[in-house]
């Protein structure tokens, strides 16, 4: 009998990828995915720890899941409850103390052990916890068993972070930087393409720190010196896969943007002209306090080099306002940097204290009202830049990858090379088509376009931006 699995995913795209892999691993053990939590025999909460009150939100969600389980038990059935992701990693055993009804707590490096933990849980008299960083790689043990959901897929190439920005929990929850072997990545990419995927987004907490063992090297463990590939080299190799029309990668650290990767932006047309490159602040003093390992000027120079390599490159970033000690002058420097870069879109957050991070111990924490005021001013500027960028798309021809049906019959929704959402009419179009459109209008969160031609073959995107 098949059991039903419901996974709720919080946070970043890496969690989305991990959830898919967990669903794949569990499908081999008789679990079929459902999107109705009421039908589930197993609920997995794949949690995120990046922002304040993350753990509290998980505990209140767990309270609701527990009520559901009590109901199931009253009906003579049962429900198994698992917590995965970065809150599971950070809290570990403490989760069972506070919520003893949890069956399994599993950290991001131990997902391949989940089916076995579920089996063991049946014989144990309390919940199980695994927050180890095992020597074996979860990737080797977690086959991607499920078919991809659409023409665009994520592929994790790197995990963890050694940068230790002083505000961030990631180095503690996801551990040290590690890269998957190139061969495994190429195999997975080819498999995805054979299943109809034509856009792959390479994922990593610090994706451009990727240095995976080269294809003909030792596939497991560290390859000898000179036997690892950087991200630029990997991207060139991926671009050789027939049918893979679009390549993206996220999230990058400015310090790891090497020459090889910059020239890949120049030379590889499949590499989309959009880059999420977080800067966090425009003030050198704040950047230093954040341990970002770059100055504002370094970032601006890097943006210039990237734009020289790929003149139509659009940029996105993350910003934190109200970091401890941030003065008005520091904040003005952030606004100035934004003015200089001109972003296509960006994310911005109020600094929030993460227990265990160096910044949480710093003096001069900023008042909530000041943070709110600065965030509003920054978001106002970023929103104006986004609209300017979208408005400049009107009248242009570009390739759009159709991702789903629109709300109106016959309408379709896709993405531009710059990640903009594009609405278009096209009765004859199918999800996965890569078509050339002309943008006819820009709306607050999307573009409208009309079809110019519908190339049957997705590799036509190798032409890059249509003239
Ligand atoms: N407070 C506010 N924002 C944070 N981020 C990470 N940690 C914190 C924190 N303690 C933001 C950063 C990062 C993004 C993923 O989340 O901007 O780039
Ligand atoms: Fe966190 Fe900084 Fe690492 Fe990004 S680079 S994951 S912000 S520590």
Image: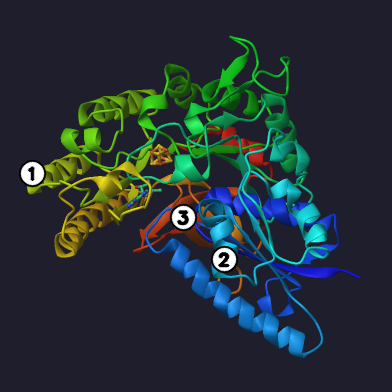
| Label 3: element kind | loop
Q: In the image, residue 372 lies at what x, y percent?
A: 20, 63
- Please tell me which residue is depicted at 67% across the width and 26% down the height of the picture: 181
- Name the colour scheme: rainbow
**Would the CB of label 3 be found within 8 Å of ligand 1?**
no
Q: Residues under labels 3 and 2: Cα distance?
A: 19 Å
Left or right relative to 306: residue 118: right
Numbered circle sitting on residue 49? 3
Q: Residues under labels 1 and 3: Cα distance?
A: 30 Å
Please tell me how many numbered marks the rendered image carries: 3
**Upstream in sequence: badge 3 or badge 2:** 3
| Label 1: element kind | helix
Task: In the rendered view, tell whether residue 46 sits above or below residue 452.
Answer: below
| Residues at marks 1 and 2 touching, judged by CB atoms closer than 8 Å | no
Left or right relative to 92: residue 262: left
Provide the residue designation for mark 1.
329
How packed is label 2: few (under 14 Cα within 10 Å), some, or many (20 or more)?
Answer: few
Q: In the image, residue 262 lies at what x, y percent?
A: 43, 23
Give the label, 1 or 2, closer to the camera.
2
**Would the CB of label 1 be found within 8 Å of ligand 1?**
no
């Amino acid at each position: 009998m098949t059991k039903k699995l419901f996974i709720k995913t919080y946070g970043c795209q890496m969690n989305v990828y991990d959830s898919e892999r967990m669903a794949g691993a569990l499908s081999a053990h008789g679990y079929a995915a459902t999107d109705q939590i009421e039908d589930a025999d197993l609920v997995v909460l794949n949690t995120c720890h990046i922002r304040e009150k993350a753990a509290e939100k998980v505990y209140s969600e767990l309270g609701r899941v527990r009520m559901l389980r009590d109901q199931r038990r009253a009906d003579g059935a049962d429900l198994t409850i698992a917590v995965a992701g970065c809150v599971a990693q950070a809290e570990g055993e403490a989760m069972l103390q506070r919520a003893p009804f949890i069956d399994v707590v599993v950290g991001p490096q131990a997902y391949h052990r989940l089916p076995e933990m579920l089996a063991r849980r049946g014989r144990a008299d309390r919940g199980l916890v695994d927050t180890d960083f095992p020597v074996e790689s979860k990737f080797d043990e977690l086959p991607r068993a499920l078919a991809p959901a659409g023409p665009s897929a994520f592929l994790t190439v790197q995990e963890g972070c050694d940068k230790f920005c002083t505000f961030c929990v990631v180095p503690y929850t996801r551990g040290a930087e590690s890269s998957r072997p190139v061969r495994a990545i190429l195999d997975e990419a080819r498999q995805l393409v054979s299943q109809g995927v034509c856009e792959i987004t390479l994922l990593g907490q610090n994706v451009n720190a990727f240095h995976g063992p080269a294809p003909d090297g030792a596939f497991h463990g560290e390859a000898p010196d000179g036997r690892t590939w950087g991200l630029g080299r990997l991207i060139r190799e991926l671009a050789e896969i027939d049918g893979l029309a679009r390549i993206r990668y996220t999230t990058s650290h400015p310090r790891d943007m090497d020459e090889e990767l910059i020239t890949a932006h120049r030379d590889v047309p499949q590499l989309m002209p959009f880059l999420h490159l977080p800067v966090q602040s425009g003030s050198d003093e704040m950047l230093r306090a954040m341990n970002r390992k770059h100055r504002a000027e370094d970032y601006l120079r890097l943006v210039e080099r990237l734009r020289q390599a790929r003149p139509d490159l659009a940029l996105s970033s993350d910003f934190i306002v109200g970091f401890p000690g941030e003065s008005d002058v520091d904040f003005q420097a952030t606004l100035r940097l934004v003015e200089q870069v001109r972003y296509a879109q960006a994310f911005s957050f109020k600094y929030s204290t993460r227990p265990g991070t160096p910044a949480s111990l710093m003096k001069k924490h900023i008042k909530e009202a000041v943070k709110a005021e600065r965030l509003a001013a920054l978001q106002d500027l970023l929103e104006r830049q986004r609209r300017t960028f979208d408005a400049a798309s009107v009248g242009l021809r570009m390739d759009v990858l159709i991702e789903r049906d629109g709300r109106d019959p016959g309408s379709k929704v896709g993405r531009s090379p710059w990640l903009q959402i594009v609405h278009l009419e096209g009765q004859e179009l199918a999800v996965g088509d890569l078509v050339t459109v002309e943008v006819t209008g820009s709306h607050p969160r999307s573009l409208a376009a009309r079809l110019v031609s519908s190339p049957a073959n997705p590799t036509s995107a190798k032409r890059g931006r249509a003239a």
